[in-house]
Amino acid sequence: MDIVLLGAPGAGKGTQAELLAEWLSLPTVSSGVLFREAMDAGTPLGRRAKEFIDRGELVPDEVTVDMIAERLSRPDCANGVILDGFPRTVAQARALEDLLGRMGRQVDVVAYIEVPTEVLLQRLSGRWTCSQCGAVYHETFNPEAVEGVCDSCGGKLVQREDDTPEVQRRRIEVYNERTAPLIAYYREQGILSEVDGDQGVEAVQHDLRAVIHAARS
Ligand code: ADP
Ligand code: ADP
Ligand code: ZN
């Protein structure tokens, strides 16, 4: 099964993707995580992406699509993937159709996680990310057990450089301009399911599983 999680920055895509991955035994493919790995490693891709990410702009489609194409070609993606943060433009959605089509696959379900803007800002401003494994916490809504330390790997928690108030607002604007059109795009294809993301993590996960279950049968 190939699943796309769609939603604004802070909607909970990364959090939910990890839980779905466990349930479905599928890998998560997160464009944001892949870019951050490349930036940490200081690769040419990472340096290119950083110029855009630091400003809250989208990395150009071509760069992003090449990175995802490489990731999807790996053996662990053979039975399907959970995509988090990709596609983010209509051009990326078309490229994804091509990539999957060449493997005899298609996007089976697009789960749109809907969250009001003021809640997005609360979530982004309290987000802490593990510098080792990428696990995501929230200082109020989903705190770690020992302050500043990742529950799962013991790594140090940090705030992302692009989680400053100014860049957060820009990312939400960019989402509304460039990514929100995908809602109508996928609705027309008949594969969009909406999930209320303004609930606790477990309730959102429950609704996502119901939507995926329905799409499977
Ligand atoms: P968030 O979790 O806040 O939605 P991500 O980790 O998904 O943020 O992405 C961080 C940044 O990486 C984005 O603001 C953007 O600059 C870049 N990025 C991630 N995915 C894409 C994509 N599919 N296309 C273009 N840029 C992307
Ligand atoms: P995205 O990948 O869509 O940007 P994240 O999964 O990184 O979203 O979540 C953004 C922030 O909100 C994180 O700090 C996370 O712990 C928190 N969060 C995620 N889901 C919920 C939820 N349902 N209720 C409250 N906080 C949440
Ligand atoms: Zn960790």
Image (spheres, grey):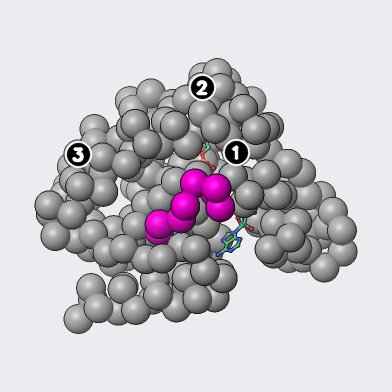
Q: Is residue 166 magenta?
A: no
Q: Position of residue 178 (x, y in %)?
A: 33, 32
- For image coordinates 62% across by 27% down, the residue present is 166
Q: Nearer the viewer, residue 63 or 9?
A: 9
Residue on which disc 1 sits? 37
Q: Is residue 158 above or below residue 147?
A: above
Q: Nearer the viewer, residue 117 or 28?
A: 117
Asked whether, in this view, residue 189 is left or right of residue 110, the answer is left
Q: Is residue 3 above or below residue 179?
A: below
| Residue 94 - label | 3
Q: CA distance from mark 1 to mark 3?
A: 25 Å
Q: Is residue 30 above or below residue 69?
A: below
Residue on which disc 2 sits? 52
Q: Is mark 2 within 8 Å of ligand 1?
A: yes
Q: Nearer the viewer, mark 2 or mark 1?
A: 2
Question: What segment carries the magenta color?
Answer: 113-120
Q: Position of residue 120 (x, y in %)?
A: 54, 49
